[in-house]
Image: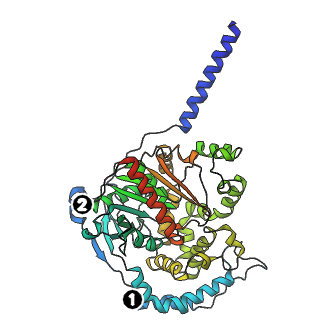
């Protein structure tokens, strides 16, 4: 080899090494950060003696929050006001947002059909055991269903933490809860669960903080503390939307506590993942099971859809209090803002329908139960602040997306969801991705739309965790 050739080889090796080092700095795995599990979020000053605080606030209180008739009557009066809505453009359904002609119909249903039956709906909402307890200075609301000892006999019994997102609530999970907990005991079903369903901080009946900084990572800490408070040091996690992010953070930060993480919205938004997604578009058959290519490609369609549907995200990530103020004490606007997501995020083609396809997949009572939770708890602003907190400099510097998640992971993809990720993208983050499925029907709110499908998928995941990791039942 000539001296010139040797020099070129040396330069290429050095250049390759520098490129690899730089890519590893941008893309490589990172260690998990340490978060303060006593970080204070309450309105009062942080307690000087935290141990004493825990002793004094560890009580779990059963609750059945009732709303006076005056509150319901005030809502009825607001809904009875003359609506001066701008008519939709000619030939336009939901393409410009919620169709105002259909909105008038829904307001009439809410006022004249749903509200007269509110006490019936109230009983429905409180069919499960509701509790509150204080975690890190904030009142946290949750559902908690425990399995009687006699019902555990002959069954695999585990705790599972269910996590909702925005603009959802604990209401999304009601049918799913019955299946997991076996409300109607089935001798042929060998799986039964203690079910814990919290309202996320700032959502529903869970108190929002008055302090900045309560982002997804900090919420994950609070959720772990809730589970430990209830006596669960090992549990499964299932979630979608923000629930998928919080569940992922729980599994990443506290692998010793999480038996398995299952999500109907697994994602990986690292630069490496994005590059992989674009390259996979050149040879889809190498990366996607046959028949499911249209979940991911063409990427231009997905990017166009995200551009059209992500305006709310940018608004809530930058000015959550502005849109929150517009929706507070504005039940018609609140319903339009929330229900439009249940249309478009279920199936993008529903934008072409004058009723947004809402009743094709959901019952109106279920949708208005969810709207009522936001309205009665006045939680629209505090719920939306999570978007802003998730994108602060402090939250980004945690780089949790680059910390490997080692616990068993299962991902169920529903075709109508907002975005999809390939296994090759997810495996960079989730090192034990043992369960990956595809469903041609269904969208973003799988627990509400297709609870039986989600349940079967979750059970299949649990079975795989048992086989591969030899976990022990309670």
Outermost residue, front side: 188
Determine whether the residue tagged by mark 1 lies in a helix, strand or loop.
loop
Question: Dot 2 surroundings within 10 Å: few (below 14), some, or many (20 or more)?
Answer: some
Question: Dot 1 surroundings within 10 Å: few (below 14), some, or many (20 or more)?
Answer: few
Image-based side of 70 in relation to 329, left or right? left
The residue located at (58%, 45%) in the rendering is 424
Compared with 431, 461 (above or below) is below
Determine whether the residue tagged by mark 2 lies in a helix, strand or loop.
helix
Number of marks in picture: 2
Q: Position of residue 143 (x, y in %)?
A: 36, 71
Compared with 283, 307 (above or below) is below
Is 8 or 202 nearer to us in this picture? 8
Dividing the picture into quadrants, the one containing residue 417 is bottom right
**Residue to which mark 2 is pinned:** 54
Is 66 or 130 nearer to us in this picture? 130
Image-based side of 372 in relation to 348, left or right? left
- Say if residue 152 shows up in the picture: yes
Colour setting:
rainbow
The residue located at (55%, 87%) in the rendering is 110
Q: Position of residue 270 (x, y in %)?
A: 56, 46
The residue located at (56%, 29%) in the rendering is 21
Image-based side of 177 in relation to 339, left or right? left
Q: Position of residue 283 (x, y in %)?
A: 70, 44
Instruction: Say which quadrant the C terminus sits in.
Output: bottom left
- Say if residue 96 shows up in the picture: no
**Residue to which mark 1 is pinned:** 68
The answer for how far apart the CA atoms under marks 2 and 1 are is: 33 Å
Badge 2 or badge 1: first in the primary sequence = 2
**Contact? badges 2 and 1 (CB < 8 Å):** no
Instruction: Say which quadrant the N terminus sits in.
Output: top right
């Amino acid at each position: 080899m000539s001296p010139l050739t040797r020099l070129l080889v040396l330069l290429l090796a050095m250049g390759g090494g520098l490129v690899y080092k730089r890519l590893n700095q941008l893309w490589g795995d990172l260690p998990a950060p340490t978060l303060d599990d006593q970080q204070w979020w309450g309105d009062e000053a942080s307690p000087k003696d935290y141990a004493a605080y825990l002793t004094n606030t560890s009580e779990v209180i059963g609750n059945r929050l009732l709303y006076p008739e005056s509150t319901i009557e005030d809502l009825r009066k607001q809904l009875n006001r003359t609506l001066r809505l701008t008519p939709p453009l000619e030939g336009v359904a939901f393409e410009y947002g919620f169709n105002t002609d259909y909105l008038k119909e829904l307001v009439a249903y809410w006022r004249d059909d749903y509200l007269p039956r509110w006490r019936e709906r109230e009983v429905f909402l409180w069919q499960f055991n509701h509790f509150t307890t204080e975690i890190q200075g904030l009142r946290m609301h949750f559902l908690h269903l425990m399995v009687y000892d006699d019902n555990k006999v002959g069954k695999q019994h585990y705790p599972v933490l269910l996590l909702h997102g925005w603009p959802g609530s604990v209401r999304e999970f009601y049918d799913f809860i019955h299946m997991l907990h076996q409300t109607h005991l089935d001798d042929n079903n060998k799986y039964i669960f203690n079910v814990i369903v919290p309202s996320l901080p700032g959502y529903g009946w869970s108190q929002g903080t008055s302090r900045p900084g309560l982002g997804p990572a900090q919420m994950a800490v609070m959720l772990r503390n809730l589970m430990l408070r209830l006596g669960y040091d090992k549990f499964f996690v299932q979630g979608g939307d923000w629930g998928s992010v919080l569940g992922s953070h729980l599994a990443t930060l506290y692998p010793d506590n999480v038996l398995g993480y299952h999500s109907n919205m697994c994602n990986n938004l690292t630069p490496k993942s994005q590059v992989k997604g674009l390259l996979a578009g050149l040879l889809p058959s190498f990366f996607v099971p046959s028949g499911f290519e249209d979940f991911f490609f063409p990427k231009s369609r997905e990017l166009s859809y995200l551009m059209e549907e992500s305006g709310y995200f940018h608004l809530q990530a930058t000015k959550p209090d502005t849109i929150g103020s517009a929706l507070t004490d504005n039940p018609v606007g609140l319903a339009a803002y929330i229900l439009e997501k249940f249309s478009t995020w279920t199936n993008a083609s529903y934008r072409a329908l004058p009723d947004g396809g809402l009743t094709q997949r959901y019952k109106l009572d279920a949708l208005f139960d969810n709207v009522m939770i936001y309205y009665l708890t006045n939680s629209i602003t505090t719920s939306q602040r999570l978007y802003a907190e998730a994108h602060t400099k402090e939250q980004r510097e945690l780089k949790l997306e680059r910390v490997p998640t080692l616990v068993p992971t299962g991902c169920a993809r529903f075709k109508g969801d907002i975005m999809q990720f390939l296994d090759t993208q997810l495996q960079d983050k989730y090192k034990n991705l043992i369960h990956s499925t595809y469903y041609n029907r269904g969208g973003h709110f799988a627990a509400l739309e297709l609870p039986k499908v989600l349940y079967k998928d979750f059970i299949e995941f649990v079975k795989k965790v048992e086989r591969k990791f030899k976990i022990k039942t309670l």
